[in-house]
Image (tube, rainbow, N blue to C red):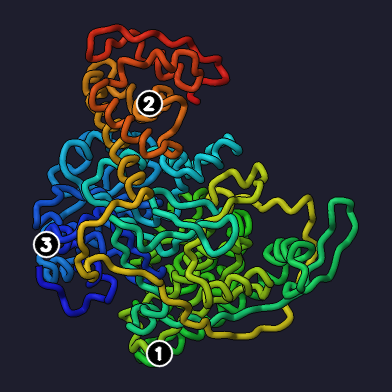
Amino acid sequence: MSLPRQLRTHQRRLAGVVAAIAAGATEARDILAAVTPGGGKSLLPVIAAARLMEAGIVQRICWVVPRDSLRLQAEEAFADPAWRAALGHEIAVRSAENAPDPCRGMQGYVTTYQGIAAAPALHLAEFRRCPTLLVVDEMHHLPASAEVDPVAAAQAETSGEEDQAGAWSRALLPLLECATVRLLLSGTLERADGRGILWLPYRQGPRLRTREVDLDAPGWAVVGYSRAQALAERAVLPVTFGALDGEATWRDPEGASVGPHRLSGYHPDETTRPALFTALRTGFAEALLREAFLAARDLRARRRRERNLPPDASARGLGKLLVVAPDQITARHYLALLRRWVPAGQAEEVVGLATSDSGDAHQTLAAFRLRPEPSMLVTVAMAYEGLDAPEVAVVAALTHIRSRPWLEQMVARATRVDPNAGPYETQRALVYHPDDPLFSRFRIRMETEQGTLAKRPRPRLSQQALPLWLREQLPPRREGITPLESNALALRFDTLAPGPELALKRPELEEAQGEMLEAPSVAERRLRARIGEMVAAQAVEDEAMLQGPRAGVAGPGLYHRYNAILKRIMGGKARAQMSLVDLEAAIGWLERNRLSEHQHLLANDPRYAWSARKRGEWRPPSGRPARKAPSAPRHKRGA
């Protein structure tokens, strides 16, 4: 496959890695693409699938995305006629539901994290049926699994709880173990909660109690594309921040009035968060939104004049405004403000709302991406990540979230180059935000740090146990404060520095080395993955024997049930806690035994009693009846 000249550096690097895999020149089967948000990673699965299918390494591709709204974009990447001609491929994928035969005669399918978690047995059976390229988009959403990560296992013992993201990781783990090649995509290698990321290799970090992604791990190929590289190649736009300072006054839980306090104050733990909470729901927010609205309106008017278009004409490439609100109630308030500022006859068409409680959210997002109108969109979290809308030129960051990964994703909505907006030199991303110390800290980190660390999370409040996308739709808990008033003071503009390069090595460019001993940590990762594949194989085989009136009852529970059986056989040690000797012994045991014949080991475990009761008196392959587990108490069912 000849490479088109218009490919970016990271796309050519990936093509080189895939070519090395196809030629047998590298043992790597895990490819991590750490591409700055907006840097164009949606073409990477197309390049990888085209070359690997051509070489016969894989026969199918499964592309997993975090949101249902992103499935169409994945389909579009393979259907793009320009890239089909440039890469010479004829691969077609479809957006699949959880129904049998997700490919339907095509070469692959696109699904979501939620889809995998809802029917993992279906997808696991597909992976066992033929060699598959697994693409996991926005990998940082998935926390490290306690089954294969020692640090996550230690944290799980102390926390004792699993959030929705953890459930996604449990469902995706067997697919990662069974995939022939894995392509993991992310715009950030850091999670908002500080935990590690599923499947990624880690090493000791530069600071105490931290780990960082091991970009030089054996068996891995890392394709990096930093913001500095993307700017140099004109793949993304430079960013100008409009920081608006202000004052806020609120009532504390005791009823006393507090403030006015400056947003840019120097006591973030004492005043910044309640001041920000107040500002986003009172007069300050209206002032910031007005600044962003006027900037977008002026940009569109200037571009109309340059094209000799009438003042009310709609066209592609004029620039759009994205407003990110702190919660759904406030989002509707911002929507009303914007519609009040545009001519009444155009309000419904020009300004759209995309939140999880609006029934037409996906249609609104699609129109915002593909049509001239709406030119303004108010959202909460739905458009934070992965939204490919190059026309977004102005962002109003009216959100309370201050974690680096999420703010980077938000800023990236405006950094895509718009092919319909004229020369690159005339385009720029403009982001308006409150001038608080926490946002300033985020900017400093973007300019100075690579963002590959994981650290032990702080104790979390009950609401923080919810996934971030859901938390953002709820008003953040501010210890019972009542917002009173706020006002804007001063606006200043700064251009974001390019930021650091991503330090990495590319295995396909390194000189061949002589025969070397395998490092213990590398051997441990390899053996853990091998055990996972063997457990998954037995689960899929036993699932097939349950087809008919009991079809589907093995499901995800059978894979994790079998893992629990193996843990008991190995003396209570999970894979993440086994030594090399233990791992080799586990593989030897699995080669000689069937896990289905040892289900009695879970007889007194209420976590598995529900699934055992559904199977009833199923006989394992050996013909010996499995012991019937006791019924779980009503409050334990489904655990």
The residue lying at 40 percent from left, 90 percent from top is: 426
Q: Nearer the viewer, mark 2 or mark 3?
A: 2
Mark linked to residue 111: none
Q: Nearer the viewer, mark 3 or mark 1?
A: 3
Q: Measure the alpha-carbon separation of dots 2 and 1.
A: 61 Å
Q: In this rendering, is residue 493 above or below 210?
A: below
Mark linked to residue 426: 1
Earlier residue among tags 3 and 1: 3
Q: Amino acid at mark 1?
A: Thr
Q: Measure the alpha-carbon separation of dots 2 and 3.
A: 43 Å
Asked if the residues shown at circle 2 and circle 1 are in contact, with their CB atoms under 8 angstroms apart, the answer is no
The residue lying at 22 percent from left, 67 percent from top is: 508
The residue lying at 90 percent from left, 57 percent from top is: 256
Asked if the residues shown at circle 3 and circle 1 are in contact, with their CB atoms under 8 angstroms apart, the answer is no
Under tag 1, what secondary structure?
A: helix
Earlier residue among tags 2 and 3: 3
Quick one: 180 or 545, which is closer to the camera? 180
Under tag 2, what secondary structure?
A: helix
Residue 258 vs residue 523: left or right?
A: right
Earlier residue among tags 2 and 1: 1
Q: Amino acid at mark 2?
A: Leu
Regarding residue 325, the answer to whether it shows in the image is: no
Q: Position of residue 471 (x, y in %)?
A: 59, 50
Q: Amino acid at mark 3?
A: His
Q: Which residue is mark 3?
A: 89
Q: Position of residue 348 (x, y in %)?
A: 48, 64
Q: Which residue is mark 2?
A: 566
Q: Nearer the viewer, mark 2 or mark 1?
A: 2
| Residue density around tag 3, few if under 14, some if 14–19, many if 20 or more, within 10 Å | many
Residue 17 vs residue 342: left or right?
A: left
Residue 155 vs residue 516: left or right?
A: right
Q: How many marks?
A: 3
